[in-house]
Image (cartoon, helix red, strand yellow):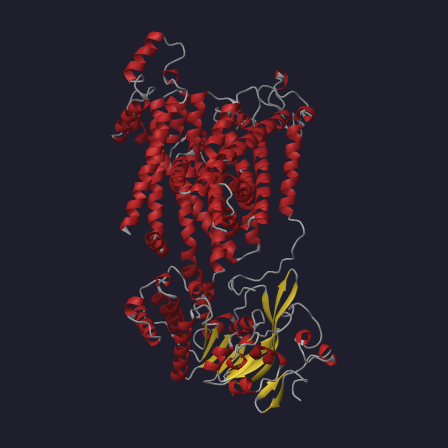
Amino acid sequence: MSVTATMLPVVARPRRRVSFRAAFGLGALLLIGGSAVLAPQLAPWDPARQMLTKRLRPPMWQAHGLREHPLGTDHLGRDILSRILHGGRISLGVGLTAVTLSALIGVTLGLLAGFFGGRADALIMRIVDVFLAIPYILLAMGVVFALGPSLLNVILVMGATRWVQFARIVRADVLSIREREFVAGARARGNRPLRLLLRHVLPNALTPIIVVATLELAFMIIYESALSFLGLGVQPPTPTWGWMLADGRNYVATAWWLATFPGLAIMLTVLAVNLLGDWLRDTLDPRLKV
Amino acid sequence: MVGYVGRRLLQSLGVLLGVSVIVFGLLHLTGDPTRLLLPLEAREEDVRQLRALLGLDDPLWAQYGRFLARAVRGDFGLSFKHQVPALALIFQTLPATLQLTAAGLGLALVVAVPAGILSALKRNSLLDALCSVGVLLGQAMPVYWLGLLLIMVFAVGLGWFPAAGRDGWTSIVLPATALGAFSMARIARMARSGMLEVLAQDYVRTARAAGIRTFVVTYKYALKNAAIPLVTIIGLEFGILLGGAVITETIFAWPGVGRLAVDAIFSRDYPLVQAIVAVLATLFVVINLVIDLVYTYLDPRIVYVRSAR
Amino acid sequence: MALLSVEGLRTQFATGAGTVRAVDGVSFAIERGEVLGLVGESGCGKSVTSLSIMRLVPPPGQIVAGRIRLEGEDLLDKDAEAMRRVRGARIAMVFQEPMTSLNPVFTIGDQIAAAVLAHEGGRRRAAWDRAVEMLDQVQVPSPGERARDYPHQLSGGLRQRAMIALALAPGPQLLIADEPTTALDVTIQAQILDLLRRLQAERGMAVLLITHDLGVVAELCHRVAIIYAGRIVEMAPVARIFEEPLHPYTRGLLRCLPHPSRFGQPLSSIEGAPPDLRGADAGCPFAPRCPLAIESCRRHEPALAERRPGHFVACPVAVV
């Protein structure tokens, strides 16, 4: 029993069974994910359909709003709700793919750096430093622009710039695991390095990888929207939340709903992912607590 | 100590070198930079001329060498669009960005650090709960959305602040708030957890056992320890904010480097893009170097440990 | 009047898994200039007792009953500021781990000076000089220079000396030493014990020495209290404990010590494990492990009673 923490005030908190935050996060995420997957079925309108007679209608609870367009319509008469639902597919889809890509790159490099140490480690870490030094937005913008804005390029760019987070955490883990006895034991039995890596080191490093992946997903969603907002993301007519926000920017004074709802969607999704990530981290690996 | 400083300097230089490689590489990503530099309808003749002019037929490493030699002297070429030296353009607009970033970071620190510390001291109180909610929302909110919301509410709706431009002290309030908000969340979390961790340490117990006043223990003893990780975060945050400035400047039409960058990218003004990335990256590296050195002052163990290796 | 008188102290921790009764009815007294040893295994409540006296029990711990009288004044009645003035100036504490117990970002001179300033005010220069003086008293070589060092620059033994200097700087009447030598090498242990003995004699200071090491007890203490499961089971002058240990637990502890006379025989240990402090079981806490336990032991908790002059035991069976 430790005898520290003498300065903290005493507040007795009953321990809960299930964390409220985690439940909320998971629930929200399922809802969002589900609606993204089922968007074609759920959306009342075709997101690209322009109904010019019903331009700039406010949400249905306001005057001039229409029941059939619960969240209003945009400047081309497209239904906002449908666009948001479809936009979710892009955001989540891109996010998940990009996270997977950056995880693959980052974990591999992190494993190599941590396991082989020495020159390989120094080299990889220097590369990490370089990537950290350049503001990600600029890098992404430059690269996307050089290669042309498209879905694939956005994923590539995001994956290729954010791998550093994975590399660092995996390397740190590998370094600490490497020193532990059971690895030395396996080595003594003559296991080849690759086998050692895959069978012993990787499973232990898996926990922080999952946690980082979740938090990175949140970042990717914002990142992708930012690129779309700047016009460098997925191109129209595919609706993305970022693009909708960019449109909405022109109507800030006249049609507040154009900009508000997509942003709200982004925020809620990111919030849900963050909550889930936090809970995962708290249960799986408190070491990572910021 | 000198050895440590020297080593960090070398490290920074190495990073800058790497950055230069990437910046150089941007132009050559597609294999043929002329595609990027000339309009699509350019004649074969023009393409050949440009290649000769820019020395694009030389081996890559030679081109890189030339690029590096010129870059070190500050010569990134002329901006295509503005027809002035790229670096000069950047120096014109950089102060505006630095001002915005500093304001955003300053605001974030002023709000978040006390909030984080107080919520650590009054754990599980109402203040703590409110801060937690604030942190959660702040981390989830995209900076551009917050910017738009701020404009909608405070500029258009209430008319308290201007929606765009850099014009008098009121015009910095909204952009700085939008920019700072994301940092606020992270800094507050860091401050809170850092403080909690320090307060749980044995040496805090020793200080109390010696009868030192609680005020002194918290704000002198504990804080100095908690400040250390906080200082490192500041360096990182500055870099993140520089990136966020790009978007914020676009929304608020703030005449800084970020807006220049977006503009340059869309005008295919590659020399300018290269120059901006190089300058901002250098700035970031320098700031982190300074932060590292400040860190060694605060925590006497670091130099000792490193030099003992 | 005794310098320190603890009566019926109970300190509990409310955890998610039940209430841990770390200190469950502890009473003892220390006279001026006396060294009382508090001996027990890990987790038996000895550290919590000392923290309770200082009122530094970490949450979720709380003192729920008892009195702690320092020269007649009940410490549990005092408000926060009054208690602060007691800490350091009248009762001081030395902890087990000198590395983590000293602030890594301040010099040891600064830290000792801070302890002086907290109670006597005055100028920083004067406090610093006092700090150097204290370091000299604890036999730190070149105290003027060492005072400017940071904790990580000193060896374990020097750090512990610095901690002692810190504790003694304000001139307390009672020093609580919580396992002061456990984390140190054996040779350094001896030095620190010597130092403590010398300082105690010079200052006529009372000491509450908390340890699990009976050897340390033999060296330094006048009287010993054996603590088990948050309760005192035996209390007597040191010589008596070694001559005639009465409580079965004490006897078990002494038998565990390797002794030349038993050379060649297997080391003995006490069977079983210490009880879960959450239990509200009736009866003597040691009963499950006790070779002498009878039926009533499991039903009635024995009280501490004086079975021989100055020798208290909480066991009805042991004294026959």
- Classify B180 as above or below A246: below
Residue B112 coordinates in the image, percent (x, y): 47, 48
Does residue B196 appear in this view? yes
Relative to C130, is C260 on the left or the right? right
Residue C175 coordinates in the image, percent (x, y): 45, 77
Nearest the viewer among C181 and B87 is C181
Residue A229 coordinates in the image, percent (x, y): 50, 27
Relative to C279, is B181 on the left or the right? left
- Classify C62 as above or below C217: above
- Classify B281 as above or below A42: below
Return the residue found at the far front: C264
Nearest the viewer among C119 and C275 is C275
Does residue C7 appear in this view? no
Residue B141 coordinates in the image, percent (x, y): 53, 38
Residue A269, picture quadrant:
top right
Relative to A36, is B143 on the left or the right? left
The number of numbered badges drawn on the structure is 0
